[in-house]
Image (cartoon, rainbow, N blue to C red):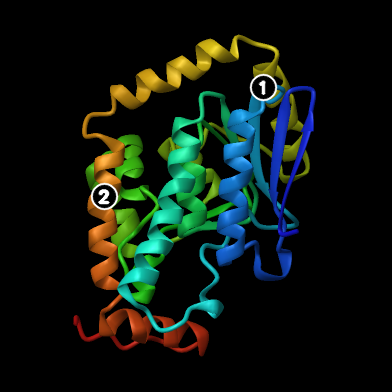
């Protein structure tokens, strides 16, 4: 199992467990993560959800090594599952905590951004690196980043694709707490238990209020994102970006 779930004292801990790939999401992992989130939402014994990665990474994005020739149906399915994951987190009427050490890039950062609390260590590295493979950010990250840090800073983070360390992320307001690597799991568990012992029904309703107050509807934004990304999946630049990534060379984009 590359996604495991344990439940203890009202806290469901979902672990992305593929350390040899820095917990990059394979197709099967996406399905397993979505199922784990949906199960946690339906399980009355679960009052709080924690998402973390095994070993020294949170999630290094999508597993590019399993990509086949892009087609519109394949692209739509990939985006659909990514959107289902972030929607499951956003609409889960229970607090969700991301515990981030090491890489949280691409869809990995999108998953963290969708959570209600992000605890991260100084070793954390956040990045929207989609442009390196000729794609726009997905997983709702543009919407969420613009909400958290404003449009101007969100554009800089997504259009440069640079990596943001844990300390800078804290300064920018992109994480809830900065916690030492050796204390991250203990602090996450303590916060999760504190929340689980609290009025989680009220917190679930509070999440609904924040979604309602967010301006443009999140689900509608994800529909637009899906159309944009599916066009880019057919582009020459995306094919070039993937080939360059897999062969560890610099890409040569042509803007088409």
Describe residue 89's horizontal placement relative to residue 69 as left or right.
Answer: right
- From this view, report whether residue 19 is shown above or below residue 117: below
Q: Quadrant of the N terminus?
A: bottom right
Horizontally, residue 178 falls left or right of residue 132, namely: right
On residue 223, the disc is: 2
* Residue at x-position 45% and y-position 49%: 110
Residue 130 seen from this side: yes
Q: Secondary structure at mark 2?
A: helix
Frontmost of labels 1 and 2 is 1
Residue at figure coordinates x 22%, y 29% from the top left: 215
- Up the image or down, 190 lies above or below 170; here it is above
Question: What is the x, y in percent for residue 134?
Answer: 31, 74
Tell me the distance, in whole angstroms, between the alpha carbons under discs 1 and 2.
31 Å
Q: Residue at x 66, y 28 (%)?
A: 43
| Label number found at residue 170 | none
Asked which secondary structure carries label 1, the reply is loop
Q: Is residue 11 above or below residue 170?
A: above
Q: Position of residue 25 (x, y in %)?
A: 57, 62
Q: Quadrant of residue 42?
A: top right
Residue receiving disc 1: 44
Residue nearer the viewer, 51 or 121: 51
Q: Earlier in the sequence, mark 1 or mark 2?
A: 1
* Rendered-image quadrant of the C terminus: bottom left
Q: Position of residue 45 (x, y in %)?
A: 72, 23
- The picture places residue 44, in percent across and down from the top left corner, at 67, 22
Instruction: Give whichever of 130, 178 is nearer the camera.
Output: 130
């Amino acid at each position: 199992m590359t996604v495991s779930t344990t439940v203890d004292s009202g806290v469901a801990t979902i672990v992305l467990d593929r350390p040899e790939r820095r917990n990059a999401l394979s197709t099967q992992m996406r399905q397993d993560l979505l199922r784990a989130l949906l199960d946690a939402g339906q399980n009355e014994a679960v009052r709080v959800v924690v998402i973390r990665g095994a070993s020294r990474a949170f999630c290094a994005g999508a597993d590019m090594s399993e990509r086949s020739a892009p087609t519109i149906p394949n692209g739509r399915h990939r985006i659909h599952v990514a959107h289902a994951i972030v929607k499951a987190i956003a609409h889960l009427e229970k607090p969700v905590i991301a515990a981030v050490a090491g890489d949280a890039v691409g869809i990995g950062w999108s998953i963290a951004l969708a959570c209600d609390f992000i605890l991260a260590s100084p070793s954390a590295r956040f990045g929207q690196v989609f442009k390196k493979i000729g794609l726009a950010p997905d997983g709702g990250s543009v919407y969420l980043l613009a909400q958290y840090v404003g449009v101007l800073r969100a554009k800089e983070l997504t259009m440069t694709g640079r990596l943001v360390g844990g300390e800078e992320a804290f300064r920018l307001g992109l994480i809830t707490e900065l916690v030492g690597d050796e204390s991250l799991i203990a602090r996450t568990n303590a916060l999760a238990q504190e929340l689980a012992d609290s009025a989680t029904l009220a917190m679930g309703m509070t999440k609904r209020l924040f979604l309602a107050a967010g301006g443009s509807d999140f689900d509608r934004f994800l529909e637009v994102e899906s159309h944009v990304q599916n066009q880019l999946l057919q582009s020459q630049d995306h094919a070039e970006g993937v080939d360059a990534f897999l062969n560890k060379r610099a890409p040569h984009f042509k803007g088409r």
